[in-house]
Image: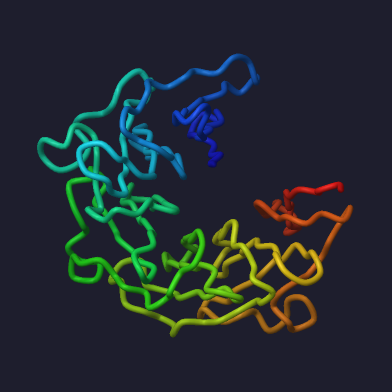
Amino acid sequence: NSLAVDAQGRILVSGTNGGVNKVLRYPTDGTAPTVFAGVPSLVVGNTVLEQKSGRILLAGRKTSGGSSGVVFAYQNTGAAEDITFGPNGSDGFYSTGINQAIDDMIIDSNDDIYLVYRDTNLKLQKVSADGSGLDPVFASGVTIDTGIVATNTAHIAMNDAGNILVGSPVGANIQTRLYNGTSGAAISAVETIADETPVLTQITGVADEFIASAYQTTGTAQMLTILVQSDGALDTVFAAGAGIAETAPQAANQMNGISVQPDGRFLMIGRKTVS
Protein backbone atom coordinates (compact mmCIF):
# COMPACT_ATOMS: atom_id res chain seq x y z
CA ASN A 1 0.00 0.00 0.00
CA SER A 2 2.88 2.41 0.62
CA LEU A 3 6.54 3.01 -0.24
CA ALA A 4 8.74 5.67 1.34
CA VAL A 5 12.45 6.40 1.73
CA ASP A 6 13.82 7.21 5.19
CA ALA A 7 16.59 9.66 6.10
CA GLN A 8 19.26 6.99 5.56
CA GLY A 9 18.01 6.03 2.10
CA ARG A 10 16.34 2.82 3.28
CA ILE A 11 12.99 1.81 1.78
CA LEU A 12 9.93 1.54 4.01
CA VAL A 13 7.13 -0.70 2.75
CA SER A 14 3.65 -1.16 4.20
CA GLY A 15 1.09 -3.69 3.02
CA THR A 16 -1.10 -6.62 3.95
CA ASN A 17 -0.10 -10.28 3.76
CA GLY A 18 -2.54 -13.02 4.72
CA GLY A 19 -4.85 -10.46 6.31
CA VAL A 20 -2.05 -9.16 8.57
CA ASN A 21 -0.48 -5.74 8.10
CA LYS A 22 3.28 -5.78 7.59
CA VAL A 23 5.91 -3.03 7.69
CA LEU A 24 9.34 -3.79 6.20
CA ARG A 25 12.48 -1.68 5.92
CA TYR A 26 14.98 -2.60 3.22
CA PRO A 27 18.63 -1.54 3.56
CA THR A 28 20.20 0.51 0.79
CA ASP A 29 21.89 -2.56 -0.69
CA GLY A 30 18.56 -4.36 -1.14
CA THR A 31 19.41 -7.25 1.18
CA ALA A 32 16.95 -8.89 3.57
CA PRO A 33 14.65 -6.36 5.24
CA THR A 34 13.92 -5.64 8.87
CA VAL A 35 10.39 -6.87 9.63
CA PHE A 36 8.74 -4.51 12.09
CA ALA A 37 6.92 -5.79 15.14
CA GLY A 38 3.32 -6.80 14.51
CA VAL A 39 0.49 -4.31 14.93
CA PRO A 40 -2.34 -6.14 16.68
CA SER A 41 -5.77 -4.76 15.75
CA LEU A 42 -4.54 -2.76 12.74
CA VAL A 43 -6.32 -4.16 9.69
CA VAL A 44 -4.82 -1.98 6.97
CA GLY A 45 -1.84 0.37 7.00
CA ASN A 46 -2.24 2.75 4.07
CA THR A 47 0.78 5.05 4.50
CA VAL A 48 4.12 4.64 6.25
CA LEU A 49 6.50 7.60 6.78
CA GLU A 50 9.45 8.60 8.95
CA GLN A 51 9.55 11.75 11.06
CA LYS A 52 12.84 13.68 11.32
CA SER A 53 12.99 12.43 14.92
CA GLY A 54 13.36 8.90 13.51
CA ARG A 55 9.92 7.75 14.66
CA ILE A 56 8.09 5.63 12.06
CA LEU A 57 4.38 6.38 11.59
CA LEU A 58 1.82 4.08 10.01
CA ALA A 59 -1.64 5.43 9.15
CA GLY A 60 -4.65 3.19 8.58
CA ARG A 61 -7.51 1.69 10.56
CA LYS A 62 -7.88 -0.52 13.64
CA THR A 63 -10.79 -2.68 14.75
CA SER A 64 -10.11 -3.87 18.31
CA GLY A 65 -10.88 -1.59 21.21
CA GLY A 66 -13.27 0.40 19.02
CA SER A 67 -12.91 0.77 15.26
CA SER A 68 -11.33 4.00 14.04
CA GLY A 69 -8.76 5.57 11.79
CA VAL A 70 -5.40 5.57 13.54
CA VAL A 71 -1.77 6.58 13.31
CA PHE A 72 0.47 3.98 14.96
CA ALA A 73 4.05 4.85 16.00
CA TYR A 74 7.09 2.58 15.91
CA GLN A 75 10.44 3.10 17.53
CA ASN A 76 13.09 3.67 14.87
CA THR A 77 14.38 0.11 15.30
CA GLY A 78 10.96 -1.25 14.38
CA ALA A 79 11.15 -3.67 17.32
CA ALA A 80 8.24 -2.19 19.27
CA GLU A 81 5.66 0.55 19.38
CA ASP A 82 6.68 4.02 20.54
CA ILE A 83 4.48 4.51 23.59
CA THR A 84 5.52 8.18 23.88
CA PHE A 85 3.34 8.89 20.83
CA GLY A 86 -0.35 9.73 21.08
CA PRO A 87 -2.59 11.08 23.84
CA ASN A 88 -1.78 10.03 27.39
CA GLY A 89 -2.38 6.32 27.87
CA SER A 90 -2.92 5.52 24.20
CA ASP A 91 0.17 3.26 23.98
CA GLY A 92 1.46 4.60 20.70
CA PHE A 93 -1.78 5.35 18.86
CA TYR A 94 -3.46 8.54 17.69
CA SER A 95 -7.12 7.93 16.80
CA THR A 96 -9.46 10.08 14.71
CA GLY A 97 -12.36 8.59 16.64
CA ILE A 98 -14.17 7.91 13.36
CA ASN A 99 -14.78 4.39 12.04
CA GLN A 100 -13.07 5.09 8.72
CA ALA A 101 -9.53 4.33 7.59
CA ILE A 102 -7.05 7.16 7.19
CA ASP A 103 -6.51 7.23 3.43
CA ASP A 104 -3.30 9.23 3.32
CA MET A 105 -0.82 11.08 5.52
CA ILE A 106 2.01 13.60 5.09
CA ILE A 107 4.53 15.01 7.55
CA ASP A 108 5.81 18.60 7.41
CA SER A 109 9.26 20.02 8.25
CA ASN A 110 8.26 20.36 11.92
CA ASP A 111 7.20 16.69 12.09
CA ASP A 112 3.54 17.71 12.36
CA ILE A 113 1.12 15.28 10.71
CA TYR A 114 -1.67 15.90 8.18
CA LEU A 115 -4.36 13.25 7.65
CA VAL A 116 -7.25 12.77 5.23
CA TYR A 117 -10.11 10.32 5.70
CA ARG A 118 -13.64 9.83 4.40
CA ASP A 119 -16.65 10.38 6.68
CA THR A 120 -19.56 11.31 4.38
CA ASN A 121 -17.38 14.24 3.25
CA LEU A 122 -13.60 14.20 3.00
CA LYS A 123 -12.07 15.35 6.30
CA LEU A 124 -8.65 16.95 6.95
CA GLN A 125 -6.76 17.04 10.25
CA LYS A 126 -3.43 18.43 11.41
CA VAL A 127 -2.01 16.51 14.38
CA SER A 128 0.89 17.58 16.60
CA ALA A 129 4.24 15.86 16.02
CA ASP A 130 3.89 13.76 19.17
CA GLY A 131 0.36 12.64 18.30
CA SER A 132 -1.08 14.19 21.44
CA GLY A 133 -3.95 15.90 19.62
CA LEU A 134 -5.06 18.31 16.93
CA ASP A 135 -2.87 21.34 16.23
CA PRO A 136 -4.56 24.26 18.08
CA VAL A 137 -3.74 26.81 15.34
CA PHE A 138 -4.75 24.85 12.25
CA ALA A 139 -8.49 25.44 11.76
CA SER A 140 -8.58 26.53 15.43
CA GLY A 141 -7.94 22.96 16.53
CA VAL A 142 -10.88 21.29 14.79
CA THR A 143 -11.27 18.82 11.92
CA ILE A 144 -11.88 20.46 8.54
CA ASP A 145 -14.84 19.35 6.44
CA THR A 146 -13.57 19.91 2.89
CA GLY A 147 -17.00 19.72 1.29
CA ILE A 148 -15.75 16.97 -1.05
CA VAL A 149 -18.18 14.03 -1.07
CA ALA A 150 -15.44 11.43 -1.58
CA THR A 151 -16.40 8.14 -3.21
CA ASN A 152 -12.95 6.52 -3.35
CA THR A 153 -9.49 6.77 -1.78
CA ALA A 154 -8.34 10.33 -1.01
CA HIS A 155 -4.83 11.78 -1.17
CA ILE A 156 -2.93 14.78 0.19
CA ALA A 157 0.28 16.69 -0.55
CA MET A 158 2.16 19.83 0.54
CA ASN A 159 3.97 22.22 -1.80
CA ASP A 160 7.08 24.31 -1.10
CA ALA A 161 4.90 27.20 0.10
CA GLY A 162 3.50 24.99 2.87
CA ASN A 163 0.03 24.78 1.35
CA ILE A 164 -2.00 21.56 1.34
CA LEU A 165 -3.89 20.06 -1.60
CA VAL A 166 -6.45 17.35 -0.86
CA GLY A 167 -8.32 15.39 -3.49
CA SER A 168 -10.57 12.41 -4.07
CA PRO A 169 -12.74 10.83 -6.74
CA VAL A 170 -16.35 12.00 -6.54
CA GLY A 171 -18.53 9.88 -8.80
CA ALA A 172 -17.36 10.41 -12.38
CA ASN A 173 -14.89 13.19 -11.47
CA ILE A 174 -11.98 14.12 -9.20
CA GLN A 175 -12.42 17.03 -6.80
CA THR A 176 -9.63 18.94 -5.05
CA ARG A 177 -9.31 21.80 -2.57
CA LEU A 178 -6.32 23.86 -1.45
CA TYR A 179 -5.62 24.95 2.15
CA ASN A 180 -3.07 27.02 4.01
CA GLY A 181 -0.92 24.51 5.87
CA THR A 182 -0.47 26.76 8.91
CA SER A 183 -3.88 28.31 9.49
CA GLY A 184 -6.08 25.75 7.77
CA ALA A 185 -7.84 28.51 5.81
CA ALA A 186 -9.25 27.45 2.45
CA ILE A 187 -7.33 29.03 -0.45
CA SER A 188 -9.57 27.66 -3.20
CA ALA A 189 -13.12 26.50 -3.61
CA VAL A 190 -13.73 22.85 -4.47
CA GLU A 191 -12.32 22.29 -7.96
CA THR A 192 -13.80 19.58 -10.23
CA ILE A 193 -11.34 18.01 -12.66
CA ALA A 194 -11.05 14.91 -14.86
CA ASP A 195 -13.89 12.57 -15.85
CA GLU A 196 -14.53 8.97 -16.98
CA THR A 197 -14.81 7.80 -13.33
CA PRO A 198 -11.11 8.15 -12.50
CA VAL A 199 -9.16 6.62 -9.60
CA LEU A 200 -6.78 9.10 -7.93
CA THR A 201 -3.57 7.33 -6.86
CA GLN A 202 -1.16 10.04 -5.68
CA ILE A 203 -0.64 13.80 -5.20
CA THR A 204 2.87 15.25 -4.91
CA GLY A 205 4.03 18.82 -4.28
CA VAL A 206 6.34 20.15 -7.02
CA ALA A 207 7.81 23.58 -6.14
CA ASP A 208 4.70 25.76 -5.67
CA GLU A 209 2.44 23.46 -7.72
CA PHE A 210 1.09 19.92 -7.40
CA ILE A 211 1.24 16.88 -9.68
CA ALA A 212 -1.37 14.13 -9.39
CA SER A 213 -1.62 10.67 -10.95
CA ALA A 214 -4.88 8.96 -11.81
CA TYR A 215 -6.41 6.57 -14.32
CA GLN A 216 -9.80 6.25 -16.01
CA THR A 217 -12.04 3.28 -15.25
CA THR A 218 -14.63 3.88 -17.97
CA GLY A 219 -14.28 4.76 -21.63
CA THR A 220 -10.84 4.47 -23.22
CA ALA A 221 -8.13 3.35 -20.78
CA GLN A 222 -5.91 6.34 -20.01
CA MET A 223 -3.21 7.19 -17.51
CA LEU A 224 -3.77 10.76 -16.28
CA THR A 225 -1.07 13.23 -15.22
CA ILE A 226 -2.70 16.28 -13.64
CA LEU A 227 -0.89 19.56 -12.88
CA VAL A 228 -2.51 21.90 -10.34
CA GLN A 229 -1.33 25.50 -9.94
CA SER A 230 -0.41 27.19 -6.69
CA ASP A 231 -3.92 28.72 -6.53
CA GLY A 232 -5.59 25.30 -6.69
CA ALA A 233 -6.75 25.53 -10.31
CA LEU A 234 -5.65 23.33 -13.20
CA ASP A 235 -2.43 24.56 -14.84
CA THR A 236 -3.30 26.56 -17.96
CA VAL A 237 -0.09 25.72 -19.86
CA PHE A 238 0.53 22.02 -19.14
CA ALA A 239 -0.73 19.54 -21.76
CA ALA A 240 -1.53 22.24 -24.32
CA GLY A 241 -3.55 24.18 -21.75
CA ALA A 242 -5.74 21.28 -20.67
CA GLY A 243 -3.89 20.76 -17.38
CA ILE A 244 -4.29 16.99 -17.77
CA ALA A 245 -2.09 14.78 -19.95
CA GLU A 246 -3.76 11.56 -21.10
CA THR A 247 -1.52 8.68 -22.19
CA ALA A 248 -1.64 4.90 -22.47
CA PRO A 249 1.97 3.74 -22.93
CA GLN A 250 2.28 0.02 -23.69
CA ALA A 251 -1.53 -0.13 -23.46
CA ALA A 252 -1.30 0.45 -19.70
CA ASN A 253 -4.69 0.79 -18.03
CA GLN A 254 -3.66 1.83 -14.52
CA MET A 255 -1.43 4.60 -13.19
CA ASN A 256 -0.46 3.88 -9.60
CA GLY A 257 2.14 6.53 -8.83
CA ILE A 258 4.27 9.38 -10.12
CA SER A 259 7.51 11.13 -9.21
CA VAL A 260 9.41 14.08 -10.65
CA GLN A 261 13.02 13.68 -11.73
CA PRO A 262 15.59 16.48 -11.18
CA ASP A 263 15.40 17.40 -14.87
CA GLY A 264 11.64 17.96 -14.56
CA ARG A 265 10.48 14.81 -16.31
CA PHE A 266 7.67 12.77 -14.78
CA LEU A 267 8.27 9.12 -13.97
CA MET A 268 5.03 7.11 -13.90
CA ILE A 269 4.33 3.59 -12.70
CA GLY A 270 1.27 1.61 -13.66
CA ARG A 271 -0.16 -1.70 -14.77
CA LYS A 272 -1.01 -3.37 -18.04
CA THR A 273 -3.73 -6.00 -18.07
CA VAL A 274 -3.53 -8.56 -20.87
CA SER A 275 -6.71 -10.46 -21.69
Pick whichever, 149 or 57, lies toward us.
Answer: 149
**In which quarter of the view is residue 247 placed?**
bottom right
Q: Is residue 80 visible?
A: yes
Q: Name, please, the residue furthest toward the front.
A: 275
Q: Is residue 259 visible?
A: no
Q: Name, please, the residue furthest toward the right.
A: 250
Counting labels gives 0
**In which quarter of the view is residue 212 placed?**
bottom right
Q: Residue at x 38, y 51 (%)?
A: 101
Q: Is residue 148 left or right of residue 25?
A: left
Q: Name, please, the residue furthest toward the left.
A: 88
**In which quarter of the view is residue 131 placed?**
top left
Q: Residue at x 31, y 33 (%)?
A: 41
Pick whichever, 208 or 133, lies toward us.
Answer: 133
Residue 216 to residue 24: above or below? below
Quadrant occupied by the N terminus: top right
Residue 268 percent across, percent down from the top left: 73, 52
Residue 13 percent across, percent down from the top left: 53, 33
Residue 194 to residue 38: above or below? below
Q: What's the colour scheme?
A: rainbow
Residue 110 percent across, percent down from the top left: 32, 50
Q: Residue at x 59, y 14 (%)?
A: 32
Residue 28 to residue 114: above or below? above
Q: Is residue 85 left or right of residue 179?
A: left
Q: Residue at x 52, y 78 (%)?
A: 232
